[in-house]
Image (cartoon, grey):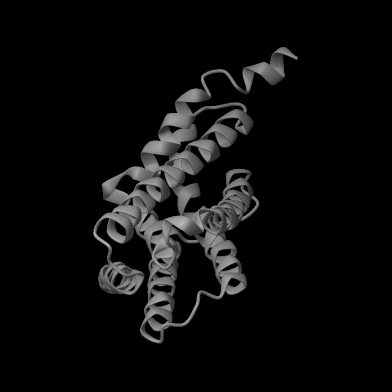
Amino acid sequence: METFLACFEGATVYLELGIRHILDPMGADHILFVVALCAAYAYKDLRKLAWLVTAFTVGHSLTLVLAAFDLVRVDQTLTELLIAVSILITAILHLIRSWRQAPAAHRLDYGLALGFGLIHGLGFSGYFRTLLGQESCITGPLLFFNIGLEAGQLLIVSLLMALNWFWTQVLRQPMRPWTLGISSLVALYAIYLIVSRIAAFG
């Protein structure tokens, strides 16, 4: 019992680190992905959006656990490139749908969120490994770090939906320019990330 409790000693530090990591402006790619994921959804679609974010969480939690226990290891430079590609694909998908005024294909979105979550989990794992140091048990840190990541994601989603409510209800603006505007900005930055990360291979 003491050994089990020792795994969770000081683990709340990892909760804070998980929140800080996903909200860190220096690692804006994870923020951008959550923003891109939410761009086609209005505040009234909060339940669907919650399931979407949950699918992303399941994906990144799975690969983060596997990587933390050293069951899977991928070159970090390649992982960062794939993360940027996942952001671009998500943004372009919403741009196409919005341009055609087509409804969101929710089943496809859930699958993409889960799949891209697997890639992002590998990105989180690189940072998580640097935090572990000499920890003899990683169960507590891993659990709380994951919870911190989820809390950070929900904070981003809440802020975005509050802005969406202001856009659609207070300013009385339609959803289409909201989705087009956000997705376009995210896509442009994702292209910049892809180009810079491809250059890193040289």
Residue 26 image offset from top left, x and y in percent: 27, 49
State the quadrant of the N terminus.
Answer: top right
- Residue 12 vertical placement versus 56 (above, below): above
- Residue 6 vertical placement versus 48 (above, below): above
Residue 100 image offset from top left, x and y in percent: 40, 87
Q: Who is closer to the viewer here, 141 or 53?
A: 53
Which quarter of the picture shows residue 108? bottom right
The number of discs equals: 0
Is residue 92 rendered to the left or right of residue 69?
Answer: left
At 38% from the left and 67% from the top, the residue drawn is: 84
At 27% from the left and 54% from the top, the residue drawn is: 170
Residue 155 image offset from top left, x and y in percent: 40, 42
State the quadrant of the C terminus.
Answer: bottom left
Which quarter of the picture shows residue 28? bottom left
Q: Who is closer to the viewer here, 174 or 8?
A: 174
- Residue 129 vertical placement versus 43 (above, below): above
At 40% from the left and 46% from the top, the residue drawn is: 158
Q: Does residue 193 appear in the picture of this structure?
A: no
Q: Does residue 64 appear in the picture of this structure?
A: yes
**Farthest residue in the right direction?**
1
